Amino acid sequence: MRIAVIGGTGLIGSQVVKLLEAAGHEAEPHSPSTGLDLLSGQGLPEALKGADVVVNLTNSPTFDDASPAFFRTSMDNLLAAAGDAHVGHAVVLSIVGADRVPDLVYYRAKVLQEDLLKAGPVPYSIVRATQFFEFVDAVLSWTADEHTVRLPATPIQPMAAADVARAVADVSAGPPLRGTREVAGPEVFALDELGRITLAARGDDRPVVTDPTAGMFAAVPGDAIIAGAGAVIAPTTYGEWLSTRAG
Ligand SMILES: NC(=O)c1ccc[n+]([C@@H]2O[C@H](COP(=O)([O-])OP(=O)(O)OC[C@H]3O[C@@H](n4cnc5c(N)ncnc54)[C@H](OP(=O)(O)O)[C@@H]3O)[C@@H](O)[C@H]2O)c1
């Protein structure tokens, strides 16, 4: 199949392109650096001409109040162009529990992206993943200073970006789900404990102070971002991933 991967130079997109190519598909990465801008629509008709599938792995440059406009404009442009080009399947990557965290504007923006896809003219699939292991260092840095890291005890079920990419590639190469597949990591951690494990693995002796008000994940109620019973559980544990990185 011919598969256009928009955001195909990013963390997930670049791995999805490799997996699809390895499975015998013709997967083409697109992004501003290749001349495709989803916000202006530049390069979209050319990228989608003859494509069987379009996979949208772009991300908003910020997680703030600008994110809904990014996802609205990018999806409006993508769906109009995919409809015109008679693309048979559109895939987006969203977040487990996004609809259960109304206080986070970025999560509301991801729900908006899903809703636009569902209402659009192209048969669709949504893959909802949990937080990437690769994202943990950024989460720690937002509420760290040179002495401590402050984190809430929010339950979190993170997973390796490589496992996310595998799930996205599998769905992209199959028929449209006309629904959502959830994928999640094999373990649930309290976020403050995940911070302690991460710092210890890095030889960083700063203490993690449990603070229910610290950072973006303070806005997550209860088990809101933990996967449901039907989720596909990814194989890679955080310990395995950390040791691979250290090696
Ligand atoms: N972080 C998490 O834990 C998590 C969890 C679940 C789901 N997700 C979702 O996963 C998706 C992919 O995340 P990621 O970390 O792989 O993103 P990323 O590494 O930041 O990559 C984003 C990609 O989008 C491209 N892009 C940005 N603006 C664009 C535009 N206007 N037009 C076309 N392409 C554009 C970038 O191109 P350039 O490189 O040229 O800028 C890049 O290829 C996101 O939608 C995110 O919501 C994330």
Image (tube, rainbow, N blue to C red):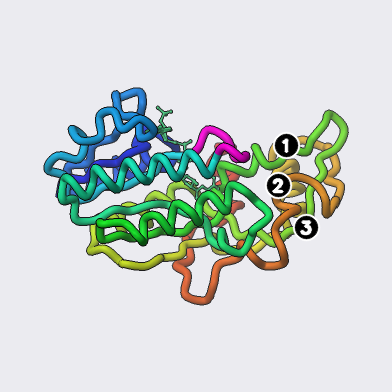
- Which numbered disc covers residue 216? 2
Question: Distance between the Cα atoms at labels 2 and 1?
Answer: 9 Å
Identify the image quadrant of residue 158: bottom right
From where the camera sits, is residue 233 visible? yes
Question: Distance between the Cα atoms at labels 2 and 3?
Answer: 12 Å
Secondary structure of the residue carrying tag 1 is: helix
In the image, taking residue 149 as reference, residue 216 lies left or right, namely: left
Instruction: Give the residue number, with chain letter if any, for mark 3.
Output: 153
> Residue 238, how many percent across, how many down?
59, 52
Name the mark nearer the viewer: 2 or 1: 2
Q: Does the magenta-highlighted stretch encompass residue 57?
A: no
Amino acid type, residue under disc 3 in the picture: Ala
The residue at the far bottom in this view is 229
In the image, taking residue 48 as reference, residue 222 lies left or right, namely: right
Number of residues whose C-alpha sits closer than 10 Å to that of mark 1, classed few (under 14), some (14–19) or many (20 or more): some
- Which numbered disc covers residue 109? none
Q: Which residues are magenta?
A: 60-66
From where the camera sits, is residue 240 visible? no
Amino acid type, residue under disc 2 in the picture: Met
Name the mark nearer the viewer: 2 or 3: 2
> Residue 127, how many percent across, how many down?
41, 58
Query: Residue at position x 19%, y 55% from top?
Result: 88
